[in-house]
Image (spheres, rainbow, N blue to C red):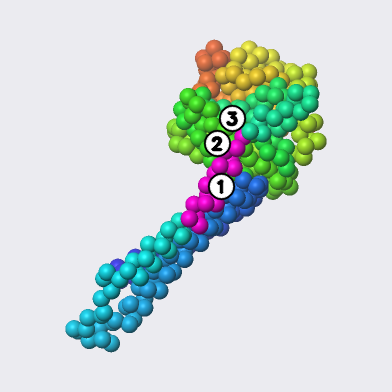
Amino acid sequence: MIKGIKKWRLFSLLAALTVFLSGCGEEYISTLTPAGQVASDQLDLMYLSTGIMVLVIIVVMIVYILTIVKFRRSKVGENMMPKQVEGSHTLELIWTIIPIVLLLILTVPTVVVTYNLADVSGMDKKDEEGNATAVTVNVKANLYWWEFEYPDLGIVTAQELVVPTDEKVYFNLIAADVKHSFWIPAVGGKLDTNVENVNTFYLEFDKPSNELETGVFYGKCAELCGPSHALMDFKVKSLERTEFNEWVTNMKDSAEAQAPQGDLALQGQEIFATSCIACHAISGEGSTGGVGPNLATFGDRNRVAGYMDYTEDNIKKWINDPEEYKPGNLMPQPEDLNDGKKYTEQELSALAEYLMGLSVEK
């Protein structure tokens, strides 16, 4: 009876795992649906290594099963001793050479792909006018948000990375506080962001993100960094080159384009100017260094705080109690900014209205 119950428990576990795994494979977040050359190369290596491991397992299992069947006691008797092959030079050569060959088959393409990904010489190439020919992004990981600076373009944003398609995009990775790890599963493997040194690599995006169901690729921190590590997400918008150039122009003009529309938004701007402006920039033009995320494109985001649905209600919840929704984050509680009091419902609505109007795409 107990044995039967244990079997049903195992079946239930497998059924639950099947349901869980059925959610894998979405284009915007799965390593199994690559959206760029880097991800495709890495997936090919995964297939190659998995194939070799499966091959080894199959061969070992065949030998194991044949041995059990051929030399089972009921067939050969109690005292039968199979022929011993100890010291056979032929067998020793076979089980020495075959593993070496398999390791070489796995090692050579792995080393080639690894060194290709480490080649960031294109980051420094200039055209005849001295302008960079490729897009370079300085990524700074903070507790628990991401900042993206485009040093050659003179703009900076946060939480949503915007890149052109069909070309290499180079990244300089660093952390502001503790070690994090930059990862866009559908586009390429993770790379650590350290406090004391800069890691560099490149990624390629082969399709516009607006073709995806979510409209964006999902990025994550892949290094345990604190209580809100699981909530340290960011989004990636990949645009055709012409659209990317338009976005850059709009970012540079964002300071003039952020005028509030309506009395409620104007009230929100006044509250923002007395409570939030010390930490948050609202212009996309400039350089890195803000205490909090740059909010120039807040109205264009599809998430609040990186992971909450983008709704007015969630914006108000986040402002009124950020510690509840991202434990350990450095955003002050409203009492620290508002004379020891929570914001009123009217003030929260005004702030939300103002923030949702900060856009470079509308």
112 relative position to 156: left or right: left
Kind of residue at disc 3: Asn
SS of the residue under disc 3: strand
Q: Position of residue 208 (x, y in %)?
A: 73, 43
Single out the residue that lies furthest toward the front.
89
From the viewer's perspective, is the residue at label 2 or at label 1 nearer? 1
Kind of residue at disc 2: Phe
Label the magenta part by its dominant secondary structure.
helix
**Of callouts 3 and 2, the N-terminal one:** 3
Label 3 and label 1: CA atoms lie apart by 22 Å
Q: Residues within 10 Å of mark 2 (few under 14, many from 20)?
A: many
Residue carrying label 1? 112
- Whether residue 114 is in magenta: the answer is yes
Question: Looking at the picture, does residue 360 appear above or below residue 186?
Answer: above
From the viewer's perspective, is the residue at label 3 or at label 1 nearer? 1
Q: Are marks 3 and 1 in contact (CB under 8 Å)?
A: no
256 relative position to 80: left or right: right
Examine the image and state in which quarter residue 276 appears: top right
Q: Position of residue 342 (x, y in %)?
A: 55, 20
Residue 222 or 61: which is nearer the viewer? 61
Span of residues in magenta: 104-120
Residue carrying label 3? 172
Residue carrying label 2? 182
Residue ID at (48%, 55%): 104
**Of callouts 2 and 1, the N-terminal one:** 1
- Whether residue 125 is in magenta: the answer is no
